[in-house]
Amino acid sequence: MTIRSVFLGAGCFLPERVLTNHELARMVDTSDDWIVQRTGIHERHVAAPNEFTSDLALKAARAALADAKVEADSIDLIVVATSTPDNTFPATAVAVQAGLGITTGAAFDLQAVCSGFVFGLSTVDALLRAGNFRRALLIGAETFSRILDWTDRTTCVLFGDGAGAIVLEAQEQPGGRGDRGVLTTHLRSDGRHKKKLYVDGGPGSTQTVGHLRMEGREVFRHAVTMITDVVVEAFKATGYTATDLDWFVPHQANKRIIDGSVHKLGIDPSKVIITVDRHGNTSAASIPLALCVGLADGRIKRGDLVMFEAMGGGFTWGAALVRL
Ligand code: UT7
């Protein structure tokens, strides 16, 4: 027998306001054609002025608890992966905790930009398997609209707001190939690239929030190699191959990056969940949002073998293989 972090349910939330490429073309020198051809994005959701990351996170968390059919007070760990917290501190996770009426256990934020959900999954998995906690909420939630320079066409067309959450529980599994739960996680960072995708402000440097800056072409150049390397590590660690996967649920930054990775890995394109067309890049929220969409429309089912991967600012990158 072995302890594994087993998936109990998922939920997500998108702000009501949809911002189309056509609207963006009236704000900056861009076009629907350019955005669709270079990124695959058609539209993204944007939070209302009074809607914070914690509000999106709380709604996704409630949906995940309902899907998992568990009570909020049974959760003893809440991790929110975000780079757009409500405040510098306290953690957005404690706002979610209070919103759910939970007064026990622990809640904290984790910041690995677009790789936040995979880094969070690895962290939560380790804490559950070590016996520190029993049942966890892992949330990816972002309001990148707040850190975009809306006059910079090279970045403002790419990102969106949203949140996705999953519930995980430490459970004994037989310890064999059919085990449910998180099977392996692989995390990487390389700070030499920190200026290629960053925010030009912060509490310690400028005492302002700052705006997202990116050398898009440079990020793109590294993305497919980094993603495929770490996915291959996950295959090697478990003995599974691309043909064993039921679903590939990648971070949704750019359809061309996803297509390039899928091709290089030999994954059947019909097994890939794509949401970048409707959500844009929602950073740490993109994977749980995509998972949620795939579960809700019935494509992804319990027991399916699912590979998650992400790459983003830092650079950070990682992969996780899970049997739902
Ligand atoms: O979440 C993880 C981190 N993020 C990513 O993974 C993003 C990675 N990068 C990308 O997805 C792509 O590099 C972008 C979508 C950001 C850009 O696509 P690209 O094919 O790499 O274009 P580019 O940056 O090489 O720009 C091509 C041209 C440039 O014009 P010149 O210099 O060739 O005259 C840009 O100025 O497109 C121009 N351009 C635009 N034109 C219309 C840049 N942004 C826009 C725009 N509309 N929004």
Image (cartoon, rainbow, N blue to C red):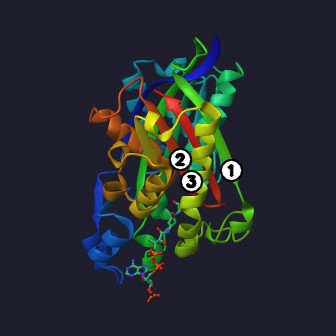
- Image: 110 above or below 83: above
* Whether label 1 touches label 3, CB < 8 Å: no
Q: What x and y, as percent, mark residue 213?
A: 57, 73
Name the mark nearer the viewer: 1 or 3. Answer: 3
Query: Measuring 55% from the left and 20% from the top, which residue is drawn there?
Result: 177
Along the line of sight, the residue nearer the viewer: 67 or 316:
316
Q: Residues within 10 Å of mark 1 (few under 14, many from 20)?
A: some
Query: Measuring 54% from the left and 51% from the top, which residue is drawn there?
Result: 310
Q: Which residue is mark 1?
A: 188
- Image: 276 above or below 171: below
Dot 1 or dot 3: first in sequence order is: 1
Whether residue 100 is visible here, answered yes or no, is no
Query: Measuring 63% from the left and 68% from the top, which residue is drawn there?
Result: 208
Q: Quadrant of ligand 1?
A: bottom left
* Whether label 3 touches label 2, CB < 8 Å: yes
Along the line of sight, the residue nearer the viewer: 266 or 111:
266
Q: Is 3 left, or right, of 35 in this rendering?
A: right
Q: Residues within 10 Å of mark 2 (few under 14, many from 20)?
A: many
Q: Which residue is mark 2?
A: 309
Three-letter residue code for mark 2: Glu
CA gap, disc 1 and disc 2: 11 Å
Judged from the image, the secondary structure of the residue bearing numbered disc 2 is strand
Dot 1 or dot 2: first in sequence order is: 1
Whether residue 286 is visible here, answered yes or no, is yes
Q: Which residue is mark 3?
A: 227
CA gap, disc 1 and disc 3: 10 Å
